[in-house]
Structures are given as structure tokens and as C-alpha cells.
Image (cartoon, rainbow, N blue to C red):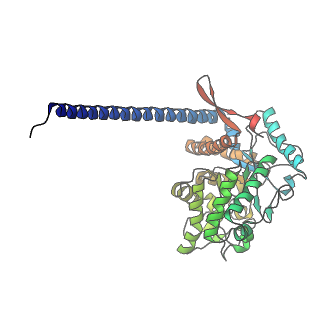
Amino acid sequence: MKFKPSLILLCSLVLFTACNNEKKINEHEQRTHELGLEIQDCINDVARQKSQAIDDFIKAIPLEERIAQLFVVNIVGCDTFIPVEENIAGGFLYFSYNIADTKSQMISFNKSIFEYCKANKKIPPFLTVDQEGGYVNRLRTLNTPLPSAEKVANELTEQEATTLYKNQAEQMRALGFTMNLAPVTEVCTPDNEQFLMERSFGSQQKVIAYGAVCINAYESNGIGTVIKHFPGNTNTDPHTGLPEIDWTQQELELQMKPFRELVKQNPSAVLMSHARVKGYDEKNPACLSKYWVTDVLRNDFGFNGIIFSDDIFMGALADNGYPPEKAVVMAIEAGIDCIMISEKRIGQSVQVLIEKAAADSDFENRLNESVRRILEYKIKCGFLKLELINGKYELCVNYQESF
């Protein structure tokens, strides 16, 4: 069978065109790939520059001021900010007597904190309050009603809960707050219900579902969330005694799953409990335990945010062989980033950490890791910002946006 020359020519042209097109496609794909690598290299380079800017900022902070960033403390009054020490803690914790009578007074008080920081060139603190709902509801006289977690889970749909928490977040931010010590993400059981009462969403399923709703609604509207109390509690009130947990494997898994799942929602922080858990570093309270803080929460669960201790002045620690000067060192060694103190002064605790850091460079490095997490949260809040100055990124205090 013979082919006509014209047909042979046509086939040759088609084959040549196809090969040429394939070559162009391959060249285009190669260039696209190379461009993608160039863009990724650029992104990575910017990320490295920003990270270095944070490191440089940390190194420039005097050690005493740097360590002060690792505390959240109570403050005086609710009228005009009155500092009790030269160093400003990383965060301020509000109790009922710190809540002003009106919204305008509350805003004025919180604004006075940032005005003081600006005038004295201090890093602004984050402002946090227990706004869980129900009877743990510090802003009940200023915000719209906030029902308890139990009532929310039993009476509202997830969409309705989203709207509820979104509105609370907007109101808290308007008052000047940046963090909420909520939600409680412990499963309610007979072993803890007398302590938790209405503060828990209830069953494991409800805790995971409504906990996620709560976290996302607050975080998406400018309020950092602090899920608590990891790994759990008993009916012993940690304000007066040391909770001793004795879980079966099934009970352990019941309480661990909500925390494991909810850290995936990227809450700003997790607050540790004072409980000791039988069979799991049972000699140390969870907030002073490297096993619970670092091995489980940080490494196993993969949580990268701030880890809070509970109040180290609670009876659970102070009355059981863990005075504050011992607890602060143990907390940092365990992996805690922010130490909660219900007192108004941190000078003595800061001095203890200064002396420890001076004697142990590894301990100072551990401190700096936590300082970095606190500062990264303040970047998220807008209190600090990374600016490109003369072709180089620098971390700067952003007083204009602090309130």
C-alpha cells in the first residue's frame, strides 16, 4: 500500500507540531516550577528575616524586663492605672474589683494602661479576664447576658452559639480586652462535676463541638482563647487543696480527646491544672510537670501556642510543698510560657528566675523560647508589628493600635 506524498507531508507536519507543542509545554512547566521555587525561596527568606527581627528584639530587652513578660498578674483598681512595680508583666488578669461600673469607665481604665506604657516605653500587656458565662462571668454588668457553657450546649444550636460568642468577643474587644480565660474543655463526670458544675459543655461530644465553636468565634473576632484546665480536675477545689486524679485508661482517653482535638483549632493558649495524675508523673502537679506540659501537650498534641500555669499562689501548690519561689522555676523547666499570679507584684519571682538564668544558660534559652511565644501573641494582637525599615525587618511596639 502506497501513501500519497501530500499525506506523508501532512503527517510529518502534525508530528512536528505535536513535538514542538510538547516541548513548549515542558518548557512552560519547567519555568512555572522554577518560578514557584523562586517565590517559595522569597517567602522563606522573608520568614527568616522576620524571625531574626523577633530574636533581635528579645536580645535587646533587659533580662529583668524580658522575664516580666512571662507573668500574668492582677492589678490595682478600675479607675486609672497605677503601676506597683517598674517592670510591666506580660499580661494583666482582672478580678471583679477591676471591673468598672460603666463601659466608658472600663474603656478609660484599660486605655490608661496603654497610655502609661507609651509614656514609659513599655511593651503593652495583654488584658485577660474570666468570661466563661454563667456564674464565672466577670463582665456581666457590662456585656449582654452570657449563659453558662452547659446551658449553651443544651439549649443553643452550634450556629446560635457562634453568634453568641461572636457578640461577646466584639464587646470584649471594644472594652479593651484581648484574651478570655475560656472555654473550659474538660468533660463533665461524677469525679469533677461538683467543681466544674455548669462550666463544662458536658459530654465529650458536646465539649469538642461547642468548644470548637467557642474558640473559633472568639479568635476570629480579636479575642484570644485559653482552653482549660489540662489535663483535668477532680471535685477538690485547687484554691484550697491539691486535686489527685486516679483515672482508668478509659477515663484518661475520655478527658484527653477534647484537648487533643481542640488544640487543632489553634486557641491562643492552654491553661494547665494543678492536679496530680496517678501513674503519670504523679509526684508533680500538672502545671509543674514536664511530662504533661512538654511531652504530652507540646510534643504529642503538637500545640504551638502559649501554655499557662494556673495561679501559683493557689492553696493547691503553696500548701503542698510548692511555694512560689520553687514553683516558678519548676514551671519554666516544665515548659510553661506564662506564669499566672493572683498577686500584684512579681519582683521576687522575677529575681528568682534571673538568678537561675545567670547560673544556667540552658535555662535562659528556655526562658527566651517562652518570651518569643508571648511576643508572637502580641504581634497577633497588634501590640507589636514587624516593619520593613531601610530594607530590614524590625519588630516595633505599635502604640497606635494597642487600644
Residue 75 located left or right of residue 201: right
Residue 189 located left or right of residue 48: right
Q: Position of residue 67 (x, y in %)?
A: 68, 43
Residue 313 located left or right of residue 306: right
Q: Quadrant of residue 215?
A: bottom right
Quadrant of image for the C terminus: top right
Q: Is residue 160 visible?
A: yes
Q: Is residue 282 shown above or below 263?
A: below
Residue at the image position 61 percent from the left and 70 percent from the top? 204
Q: Position of residue 61 (x, y in %)?
A: 67, 35
Q: Is residue 325 visible?
A: no
The residue furthest bottom is 190
Front-most of residues 197 and 18: 18
**How many dots with numbers?**
0
Quadrant of image for the N terminus: top left
Q: Position of residue 356 (x, y in %)?
A: 63, 45
The residue furthest left is 1
Front-most of residues 113 and 359: 113
Q: Quadrant of residue 29?
A: top left
Q: Quadrant of residue 233?
A: bottom right
Front-most of residues 334 and 149: 149
Residue at the image position 56 percent from the left and 65 percent from the top? 257
Q: Is residue 323 shown above or below 254?
A: above
The residue furthest top is 390
